[in-house]
Amino acid sequence: MDKMLRNKKAILVFMLPAFLLFTLVLFIPIVQSVYYSFCDYKGYTAPVYIGLDNYKALLSDKTFGIAIKNSMFFLVFSCVSQLIVGLLYAALLTNIKAGRNTFKNIIYLPCVLSSAALGLMWMFIFNPKLGINQLLEKMGVKEPPLWLMDTRGTIILPMWVIAFVALWQYVGQSMMLYMAQISGINKSLMEASYIDGCTKAKTFRYITLPLIKPMVATAMSLNAIGSLKFFDLIFNMTDCGGPNHRTEVLATHLYQQGFKFSKYGYASAIGVVLLVLCLLVTLFINKVVKTEQYEM
């Protein structure tokens, strides 16, 4: 093995497939998108260079403003809620023995199911004439909420509904990451804390949390990137940003402009903004959540 690791040709051979895949699938499309963002490009004609016109148009695009606001809401809600709920689930399931795998599978199951199917399911559940509203009417509520149609408030009700559905679907991913990190902590540290008189709550706060900080940073980065490029549930639950574009996010606005109106240059500009936001948020999280390496 050591001889192979010293062989530069062998290293290049092993790296070549991954490098080619990265270049063809990720790097080249990103470079093309950046180029198209400076062009008037409709897909069926040659791209025409127009400079910063697409980016200037974004500043006066009201729907883009709504999409930015909603994406930022998803970003904050997802990072905070999945951190708290994911840690809570991980802490509870780590400390129980009976039924641990059953509860773990139930919580994680929505992560592996089709988001399109789940979006349609929740759309029917929150339909004004079906699901929850029908149950509320039988309980005596005369005017049940219009869960996916109410447009009052700065953050409208449909955005809260979709955010909680997203939390239900993806919190299992954060839970599994935290559980994996917690299971790697040396049990002697826990036992020593209990011997010193620490409660389970204090042990979790002063021992477990510092030791799983690297995984917290990783999970928050994944949640942040996932929330910024959030698309599937909104597409299915609100018919791609309805009512009246009030639930638009960056991904749905990009889809509308690119695939519905054939404004591929303008859509590429939205994509570049989305890429820059993902990079900035990831750098911010890694800067704020300072991690130290401990021997576990």
Image (tube, rainbow, N blue to C red):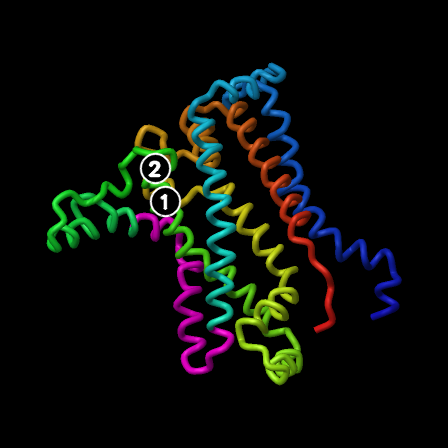
Q: Nearer the viewer, residue 202 or 48?
A: 202
For residue 31, what is the image quadrant? top right
Does 39 appear above or below 161?
above
Residue 116 covered by magenta stretch: yes
Horizontal side of residue 221 vs 104, given as left or right: right
Query: Disc 1 versus disc 2: distance between alpha carbons?
Result: 7 Å
Q: Secondary structure at mark 2?
A: loop
Quadrant of the rendering where the N terminus is positioned: bottom right
Residue occupying the point 53% across, 29% down: 270
Residue 12, horizontal then vertical, whole percent: 80, 54
Helix, strand or loop: magenta stretch: helix
Q: Nearer the viewer, residue 96 or 47?
A: 96
Would you call the spot at circle 1 few (<14 residues within 10 Å), some (14-19), or many (20 or more)? some
Marks 2 and 1: in contact by CB < 8 Å? yes
Q: Residues within 10 Å of mark 2 (few under 14, many from 20)?
A: some
Disc number for residue 183: none
Specify whether residue 266 is painted magenta.
Answer: no
Q: Secondary structure at mark 1?
A: helix
Q: What's the mark number on residue 156?
A: 2
Question: Which stretch is magenta?
Answer: 93-120
The residue tagged 1 is 160
Does any portion of residue 292 appear in the rendered image? yes
Q: Point out the image quarter for the C terminus.
A: bottom right
Rendering coords of residue 105 (x, y %): 42, 70
